[in-house]
Amino acid sequence: MNLKTIANDILPVYENQSGEKLVDARELHSNLMINTRFNDWISRQISNYGFTEKEDFYSFLSKSSGRPAREYLLTMDTAKEIAMIQNNEMGRVIRKYFIEVEKRFRQQQPKSVEDLIIMQAQSMKELKQTVEEHDRQIETVNHRLDNIDKIDTLGDLQQRLNKMIQRLAQQEGWSFAKSWREFRTAYNTAFRTNLKAKMNNYREKHGLKSLTIPQYFSLTDQLKDAVRIADKLLNSKENAI
């Protein structure tokens, strides 16, 4: 019997190919915390309450390398009744859980042909949106790969960062200095810092006469972060065109 799990909050609830909701008797026995041995317990439930095979439950032999055990799948009505007759708190909790699962799936079922058409149309709309989103993501990835090719990634990270800022200047019609200012603003926003102040402090501390942004990032091992910010800035500006 091919089953799929449709709920698994307290214990699994399964659905067969016909849409029938089923519960594994052994899993129910375990969750009800019954002290009686499973085989004795399930036999007693079937006998005492007159449950009928293929109507209230299904039985089969498990596939195992050892001695096969008999397993039982209960219909939801049977599982609810067994949970109720245990007359304990866990039985009441599980019975309410089964009722909630049934309610949840009733609400999902179309009530008319019109409802079915609306649900299908909604599913098609959601599928179209998902495909469009995937297309946008692929376009963004391809766009970034194109940019990387144009920037020449064979150089070291300092060279790459410089070339990315040069490309930003060309793309936006800015001066090289303005492109660096835009980069510095984006970096400060991303890391909640003040790059200019940090560079001044570093230069004074180490007695340096001059210090460029790529040099500072190289000396402080932050070039990868800088290239990532430049990449985001470059692509966001081009996408806005």
Image (cartoon, helix red, strand yellow):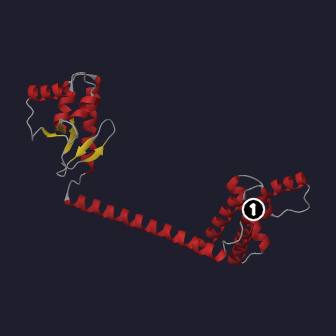
Whole-percent x, y for residue 69 in the image: 18, 35
One can see residue 115 in this view: yes
29 or 100, which lies in front?
A: 29
- Please tell me whether residue 225 is drawn above or below residue 66 in the rendered image: below
Q: Residue at x 79, y 57 (%)?
A: 219
- Please tell me whether residue 99 is drawn above or below residue 184 in the rendered image: above
Whole-percent x, y for residue 26 in the image: 23, 33
Q: Residue at x 67, y 56 (%)?
A: 190
One can see residue 241 in this view: no
The quarter of the picture where residue 14 lies is top left
Q: Residue at x 49, y 69 (%)?
A: 138
Q: Is residue 168 left or right of residue 198?
A: left
Provide the residue designation for mark 1. Answer: 184
Whole-percent x, y for residue 127 in the image: 36, 64
The quarter of the picture where residue 134 lies is bottom left
Q: Is residue 90 left or right of residue 179?
A: left
Please state the total of marks drawn on the protein image.
1
Whole-percent x, y for residue 78 in the image: 16, 35
219 or 225, which lies in front?
A: 219
Give the crowd class for mark 1: few <14, some 14-19, many >=20 residues within 10 Å: many
The quarter of the picture where residue 147 lies is bottom right
Q: Amino acid at mark 1?
A: Arg
103 or 223, which lies in front?
A: 223
SS at badge 1: helix
214 or 189, which lies in front?
A: 214
For the C terminus, the image quarter is: bottom right
Q: Residue furthest front?
A: 66
- Please tell me whether residue 91 is drawn above or below residue 185 in the rendered image: above
